[in-house]
Image (cartoon, rainbow, N blue to C red):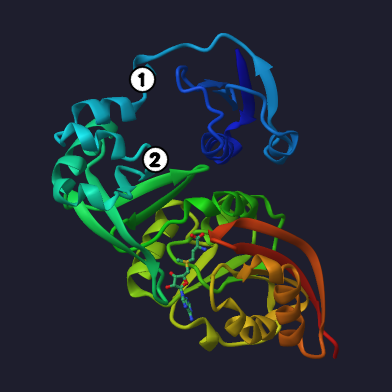
Amino acid sequence: MLGVRVPKGSAEAIRLKLTRSNLVDKRFLIIEEDDFVIIPVLEEPDEELLANHCAQMTSLDFPTGKSRVDPIETIRKDADVPDALRGLLPDKWEQFGDVVVIRLPKALDGHESSVGDIYARVLGVKAVLRDTGGVTGMFRMPVVKKIHGSDTVTIHKENGILYKFDAARLMFSSGNVEERLRMSEIMCNGETIVDMFAGIGYFSLPLAVNQRPKKVISCELNEISYSYLLENVRLNDVEGVVEPILGDNRELPGEAFADRVIMGYVKTTHEFLPTAMRLVKDGGMIHYHETCPNELLPGRPVQRLRSAARNHRVEVLRFKEIKSYSPGVSHVVLDARVVKSS
Ligand SMILES: C[S@@+](CC[C@H](N)C(=O)[O-])C[C@H]1O[C@@H](n2cnc3c(N)ncnc32)[C@H](O)[C@@H]1O
């Protein structure tokens, strides 16, 4: 049988991508072998995907396990809902540690409690949240309803990093998994880094845990996120490297001291470019995120970087779509070197 053999550090990222493309062969168990993970697949994925994760194809007999039955089959079979609605129970959900977030069609409105109970039981989680309004506001807070359990604080593990957060009050974008992984691989020994929109440490932690920066200044405006950021710095043992700051990144003092500035924010990121340009040093790098209508790519984000740079030069070294943000709109990230004229 076909399998994808991937180093442990990249396993979660590629598993998510393979699952999204319906390539994982769920009849069989994923296995671990030394520092590698082997994921059973139905067919060979794209070469680029394999190369991006240092993965290779292999062939072996995968074990089958108790979990051979797809959980959705049990959920649909056992749920306490009318038969006509069983097919509407979603076969996709997001799991963060021991909390699950699902989207339900309106037809299941009167059955939320039974639905929450069955997902909790089959998936073995303590809380189930119904996503009712996506992510909103300056703090990017999720709009969710608790449909099972009351304790929604969880510790989510991804690529070896522990992220503790309250899933009912804070977002965690699973679509950004590859960018978090990329941050963990950025060579930044001895660098001073500013993470302007730190949240619970989405980018600061992978970087600080896996590389050797001198300092990561992680700025966060929302007190709730900040409190988890503090905890996560301790949980991941990077107290000496990450310096959390509670406040508006536009008020960060100093200029031209950052080797690297991370701007992991969407919608209004460009409004913060003047601050990034002030903080970055000559030859430093800005990781600029933007949500942009596809027809304006790649011109608009490049133009915004150039106009914020004023008389400095901007060299765009990399441009990548992170994910589709909404119909016709992409979340992209640009790596831009800033050459400051004196
Ligand atoms: C939730 S994160 C974005 C998602 C994240 N990059 C990921 O990978 O999932 C953005 C964070 O920026 C914070 N924020 C918004 N405006 C800010 C500002 N002016 N200064 C500092 N933090 C800010 C928000 O509170 C939020 O926690």
Q: Residue at x 23, y 46 (%)?
A: 127
Tell me where residue 322 appears, x and y as whole percent.
62, 56
Q: Residue at x 58, y 84 (%)?
A: 271
Tell me where residue 239 appears, x and y as whole percent.
47, 61
Q: Residues within 10 Å of mark 1 (few under 14, many from 20)?
A: few
Locate the N terminus and report the quarter of the image it occupies. Answer: top right
Above or below — where is 19 with respect to 108? above
Q: Residue at x 63, y 25 (%)?
A: 4
Tell me where residue 135 appears, x and y as whole percent.
39, 65
Residue 290 visible in the shown view: no
Tell me where residue 238 appears, x and y as whole percent.
50, 57
CB under 8 Å between discs 2 and 1: no
Q: Residue at x 53, y 22 (%)?
A: 32
Relative side of 44 to 309, left or right: left
Q: CA distance from mark 2 to mark 1?
A: 17 Å
Secondary element type, mark 1: helix
The mark found on residue 215 in the picture is none
Q: Amino acid at mark 1?
A: Ser
Mark whose residue sits in front, 2 or 1: 2
Locate the C terminus and report the quarter of the image it occupies. Answer: bottom right
What residue does disc 2 label?
A: 92
Above or below — where is 95 with respect to 54? below
Q: Amino acid at mark 2?
A: Lys
Q: Earlier in the sequence, mark 2 or mark 1?
A: 1
Residue 94 visible in the shown view: yes
Secondary element type, mark 2: loop
Above or below — where is 109 with respect to 244? above
What residue does disc 1 label?
A: 67
